[in-house]
């Protein structure tokens, strides 16, 4: 049974003091929730402070990106062992990293391997742009981005978190139609099954991301292949993140009831 995961990507927002205040408000607001995993991805400068505060309260932590090398002359980057000090997860290949910083699938492949090698769980983001969708190429683009998973082992694939985030839906308020998101997720899970076997594909968690809000999350979580959400804007407000978390907890509770 896959535990629902609601992840908040804070992107390039908040100083340490602001991040601590938001993490405290979130932890207070979600304190009684069970059956859902909640994850915060603060900027790297606030990772230590947020981890110290939120991890003891049961929240998971992620870095928003990292380099693949263990250490070295890579000015401005953070290495897997540095992330590992504070977080169990790392977001890789977010469309903003691909678009503004030129991250390629080949680089992401190295980063995915580095994450697993250091005991980090990668949250690999895939998603097509608007022109690609309008040209009828969404499926091919997203399946092609799975090249970043080449060479990972079956047991690693089982731990993977894969986020489908159509680029045109991120930060635009134009969320993907839930039925279409569900279709893309089923496509991705089939692709994982073909490459890594059905047992691993059944364990991997798939998230939808792109303008997820408290008033639309339930429609995504109703799909059997959507195990949670990767949330940007709505994660920067504690009551709104808590509402998303409650939707995840409800999905988890229903799953538990349904399982023998
Ligand atoms: P959004 O961002 O929720 O603000 O659309 C999603 C994301 O970038 O992961």
Image (spheres, grey):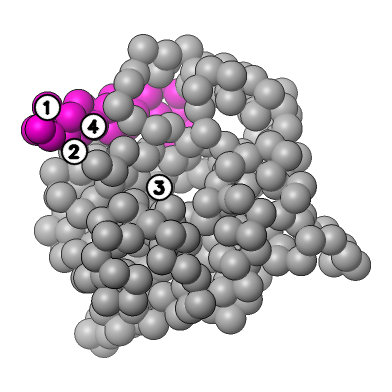
- Between 81 and 209, the one lying in front of the other is 81
10 Å crowding of disc 2: few (<14), some (14-19), many (20+): some
Magenta span covers which residues?
A: 235-260
Q: Is residue 197 above or below residue 106?
A: above
Please report the residue visible at 20 percent of the width from the left and 54 percent of the height from the top. 225
Q: Position of residue 21 (x, y in %)?
A: 62, 19
10 Å crowding of disc 3: few (<14), some (14-19), many (20+): many
How far separated are the C-alphas under marks 3 and 4? Answer: 16 Å
Residue 230 badge: 3
State whether label 3 is within 8 Å of ligand 1: yes
- Between 171 and 118, the one lying in front of the other is 118
Looking at the image, is mark 3 or mark 2 earlier in the sequence?
2
Report which quarter residue 222 is drawn in.
top left
Residue 218 badge: 2
Q: Which residue is mark 4?
A: 252
Point out the frontmost of discs 1 and 4: 1
Label 3 SS: strand
Q: Which residue is mark 1?
A: 257
Label 1 SS: helix
Report which quarter residue 114 is drawn in.
bottom right
Please report the residue visible at 22 percent of the width from the left and 70 percent of the height from the top. 190
How far separated are the C-alphas under marks 3 and 2? Answer: 14 Å
Label 4 SS: helix
Q: Is residue 30 above or below residue 230?
A: above
Q: Position of residue 253 (x, y in %)?
A: 20, 26
- Magenta highlight: main SS: helix
**Visible in this render: residue 240?**
no
Q: Are marks 3 and 1 in contact (CB under 8 Å)?
A: no
Point out the frontmost of discs 1 and 2: 1
Q: Are marks 1 and 2 in contact (CB under 8 Å)?
A: no
Let me know if residue 14 is in the magenta part.
no
Quarter of the image with the N terminus is top left
């Amino acid at each position: 049974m896959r535990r629902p995961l609601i992840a908040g990507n804070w992107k390039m927002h908040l100083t340490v003091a602001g991040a601590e205040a938001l993490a405290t408000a979130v932890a207070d607001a979600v304190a009684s929730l069970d059956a859902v995993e909640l994850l915060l991805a603060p900027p790297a400068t606030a990772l230590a402070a947020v981890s110290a505060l939120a991890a003891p309260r049961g929240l998971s932590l992620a870095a928003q990106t990292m380099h693949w090398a263990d250490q070295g002359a890579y000015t401005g980057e953070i290495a897997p062992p540095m992330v590992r000090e504070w977080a169990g997860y790392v977001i890789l290949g977010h469309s903003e990293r691909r678009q503004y910083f030129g991250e390629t699938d080949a680089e992401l492949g190295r980063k995915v391997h580095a994450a697993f090698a250091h005991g980090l769980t990668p949250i690999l983001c895939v998603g097509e742009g608007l022109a690609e969708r309008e040209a009828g190429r969404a499926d091919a683009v997203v399946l092609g981005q799975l090249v970043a998973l080449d060479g990972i082992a079956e047991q690693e694939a089982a731990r993977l978190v894969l986020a489908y985030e159509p680029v045109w839906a991120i930060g635009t308020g134009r969320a993907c139609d839930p039925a279409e998101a569900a279709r893309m997720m089923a496509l991705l899970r089939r692709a994982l099954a073909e490459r890594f076997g059905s047992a691993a594909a059944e364990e991997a968690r798939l998230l939808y991301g792109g303008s997820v809000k408290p008033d639309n999350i339930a429609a995504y979580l109703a799909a059997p292949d959507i195990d949670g959400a990767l949330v940007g804007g709505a994660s920067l407000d504690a009551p709104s993140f808590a509402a998303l978390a409650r939707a995840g907890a409800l999905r988890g509770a229903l799953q538990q009831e349904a399982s023998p």
